Amino acid sequence: MNRLLSRYCQMLEVVSVVLLALMVALVFANVALRYLFNSGITVTEELSRWMFVWTTFLGGIVALRHHGHLGTEFLVGRLGPKGRKACLAVGYLLMLFVCWLLFRGALDQTILNWNVSAPSSGASLAWFYAAGVVFAVSAAAILGVELLRLLTGRLRDEDLVIIRESEDHA
């Protein structure tokens, strides 16, 4: 399962890079057209916004997989291994609950906007809200695997704190 999640995250990294490159190209082209030719492509603003949202959600999945989110271990760092395991289990359960809430909300918005067209491109707005569904399902899978590793005792003591203290360590 770890290899499958690792390959999935590698694929998400590639997709994020492609989306970011397309977003930069679209915005640059639109700026150049506006300043050089006093015209522009209206769909580029909408598409670049959608790409930004998708890149943000996909990057959040990759960061979750690599434990790249910032945080603090002020309390957890003072606990012993059993206390850390208990805090980590509670944290995973709370994060899984938030994934469920995000999934339900994003799925409801996706279904609600299925037949609503975007103003510039005419594409379904469901694509915009589907980023939340993809994030919630992917994050829940990652958190579920991590929780299973914790409950089966396959985590080392140094893996019980899953945050980064500062950006210097990232």
Image (spheres, rainbow, N blue to C red):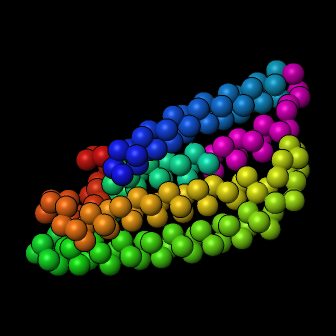
Q: Name the side, left or right, on which 158 lies relative to 127.
A: left
Asked whether residue 4 is in view, the answer is: yes
Q: Is residue 101 above or below residue 111?
A: below
**Which residue is drawn at the image coordinates 51% and 69% (left, top)?**
99
Image location of residue 152, percent across then percent down: 22, 68
Q: Is residue 144 above or below residue 32?
A: below
Image location of residue 14, percent across then percent down: 51, 34
Image location of residue 105, percent across then percent down: 65, 72
Q: Is residue 28 above or below residue 66?
A: above
Asked whether residue 76 is in view, the answer is: no
Magenta stretch encompasses residue 31? no
Q: Main secondary structure of the magenta part?
A: helix
Foreground residue among 85 and 20: 85
**Which residue is drawn at the image coordinates 14% and 77% (left, top)?**
82
| Quadrant in the rendering for residue 21 | top right
User: In the displayed image of the protein, which residue is found farthest to the top?
Assistant: 36
Looking at the rendered structure, the number of numbered marks drawn on it comes to 0
Magenta stretch encompasses residue 43? yes
**Which residue is drawn at the image coordinates 88% and 47% (left, top)?**
122
**Which residue is drawn at the image coordinates 32% and 68% (left, top)?**
147
Q: Name the side, left or right, on which 144 lies relative to 161.
A: right
Q: Name the side, left or right, on which 37 lies relative to 61.
A: right
| Quadrant in the rendering for residue 15 | top right
Residue stretch in magenta: 37-53
User: In the displayed image of the protein, which residue is found farthest to the left?
Assistant: 80
